[in-house]
Amino acid sequence: MERPMEKPQIIRSTEGLPRLLSDAASRAAVDAALTPTQQANYKALRALVQDVARHRLPGATSEHSDFYDENGLPV
């Protein structure tokens, strides 16, 4: 009698995920918890981030307060 295939665990919270992904062994454990579609999407996203990171200028941030006034409206 064949054992039914176990469903992969789904990550339900992103809290602490960056710390998990920083370690290669943990990254493998996270990959194992993803569905094949999620794994493919994750690998594609990591490849995109690595490609784009090459073009990041030194000192660049995601802070854009200079685009908004004191009320949070675009200037």
Image (cartoon, rainbow, N blue to C red):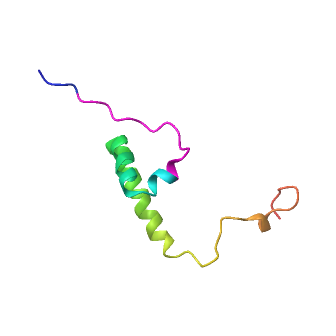
In the rendered image of this protein, does residue 57 appear above or below residue 14?
below
Within the image, what quadrant is residue 66 found in?
bottom right
Residue positioned 11% across, 20% down in the render: 1
Q: Quadrant of the C terminus?
A: bottom right
* Region rendered in magenta: 5-18
Q: Percent from the top left, x then y, of residue 36?
A: 32, 44
- Residue furthest out toward the bottom: 58
Which residue is at the far left? 1
Left or right relative to 28: residue 54: right
Q: Residue at x 56, y 74 (%)?
A: 56
Q: Left or right? Give the position of 3 relative to 53.
A: left
Q: Decide: is 72 above or below 54.
A: above
Name the residue at the right extreme. Answer: 70
Number of marks drawn: 0
User: Is residue 7 part of the magenta span, yes or no?
Assistant: yes
The residue shown at (38%, 35%) is 9
The image quarter in which residue 60 lies:
bottom right
> What percent of the width, then of the height, locates residue 47?
40, 63
From the viewer's side, name the closer residue of 49 and 67. 49
What predominant SS class does the magenta segment belong to? loop
- Please state the horizontal and vertical placement of residue 41, each as a whole percent of the image: 40, 51
Residue at the image position 83 percent from the left and 56 percent from the top = 72
Is 16 within the magenta? yes
